[in-house]
Image (cartoon, grey):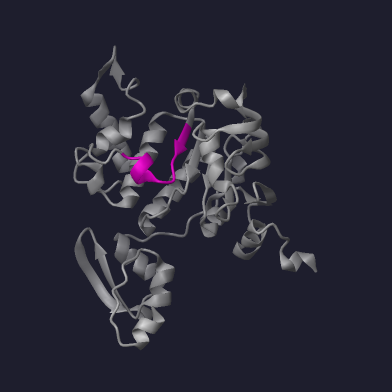
Amino acid sequence: MASLKDAGSGVIWITHRLEELYQITDQVTVMRDGRFVESRPTASLERDEIIRLMTGRQIADSEAPDPAHIGSENRLVISDLHTAGGLKGLSMAVRAGEVVGLGGLAGSGVEEIGRALYGLHPVTRGEIELLGRPFRPRDLRPHRLARQGIFYLPGDRQSEGIVDVRPVSENATLSSLDALGRMGFLHRLNERRTVADYVQRLRVSTPSAAQPIKLLSGGNQQKVLFARGMLTEPQLFILEEPTQGVDVGSKADIYAVTRELAEAGAAVIVISTDTRELLTVCHRIIAISQGRMSREFTQGEADEEQLVSAYFGSQDSREAV
C-alpha cells in the first residue's frame, strides 16, 4: 500500500479492522446500515470514537470472565488425542463455567481440535470423556453429540453454518425444531416468539426474522448461529473462530454472550487465531504447537508476545534469562 501511495495512486481500503485503518489510511469514511455517517482524517479519530460512529453506540472494553463461576465438574476430558490431520497426543480438560482458549499457528493442529471433537475429522487414538461419559473415537458423531448437549460453531459460517437462502428464523431454530413443535409439527407462533426474543437479546440487526439470512452482515449472521446453539441449551460450546469477519460491535456482543454462557454454567472452548481475542475472553489459554500442548496460561498470565512465542513451541525470551 505504501508503494502505491508513493507512486501517486489513490487507494480505497474497505475494512472493519481498526488496526488496518490506523496503519494504512489517511482518511476514514464511516458507513452504518448502508448510510454515510462521517468522513474525517484518520489521525483525528480516537479508537473509541470510530467504534461509536460504526455502531451507533458506546461500547465499553470487554470484561474478563469471572473465575468465580468455574465449577469442579469436568465437561470435557481428552487424553493422548491423535488425528490423521495433525494432533499428536493432546490432553486437556474443561470444567463447567470455564472458557478455555486454544490457539496456534497454521498447521499446528489447532484447527483439527473442534472438528475432531465433533466427529467431523476422524480420531485415530485417544481417550475422550464428554459430559461425564466416555466416548470411543468411532462413537463421535455430530447428531449424537448434539443430542448429548454439545454445540459446535464452525469456523466457516458461509459453507458450514448458515443456510443462506432461508430466513433468519429458520436458521436460528434449525437445531431445535422438536422443542418448538408437537407431534412432528412446528408451532409457528412459538417459533416467532422464541426467535424474536433471541434477536433482541443478541442485538441481531434485521428488519424481520423472515429476512433471508444471506442479506445480513457477517456479524449478524454469526449471532443467529449463536442463537441456534443457545436454543438447544448445550452444556459444552465449541466455538471455532467465533468473531472472524465480524464488525467491532458484533464482536463485543459475542464476547458478552460467551461470558454469559460460562456464568450460566456452560463449558466453552474458543478456538481462535486472534491472540487478543483469547486474552480477552478466556480463563485459560492452551497454546498448540506441532499437534501438542506447548504451554498453558491462566487468566492475566500472558501477553500477545508470550502467546505467539508459545505457538512456536519456545519459552518466552524474558523467562529464559
Task: Determine the residue positioned at 60% across, 63% down.
Answer: 304
Q: Which quadrant does the N terminus fall into?
A: bottom left
Q: Is residue 13 visible?
A: yes
Q: Position of residue 15 (x, y in %)?
A: 34, 65
Instruction: Determine the residue located farthest toward the top in the rendered image.
Output: 183
**Span shown in magenta:** 151-162
Considering only vertical position in the picture, is 59 above or below 231?
below
In depth, the one of 183 and 51 nearer the eye is 183
Q: Quadrant of residue 8?
A: bottom left
Considering only vertical position in the picture, is 3 above or below 321?
below
Considering only vertical position in the picture, is 260 above or below 3?
above
Q: Position of residue 72 (x, y in %)?
A: 66, 33
Please tell me how many numbered marks the rendered image carries: 0
Task: Determine the residue positioned at 41% across, 34% down.
Answer: 230
Is 293 displayed left or right of 115 in the figure? right
Considering only vertical position in the picture, is 181 above or below 272?
above
Q: Quadrant of residue 310?
A: bottom right
Q: Is residue 263 visible?
A: no
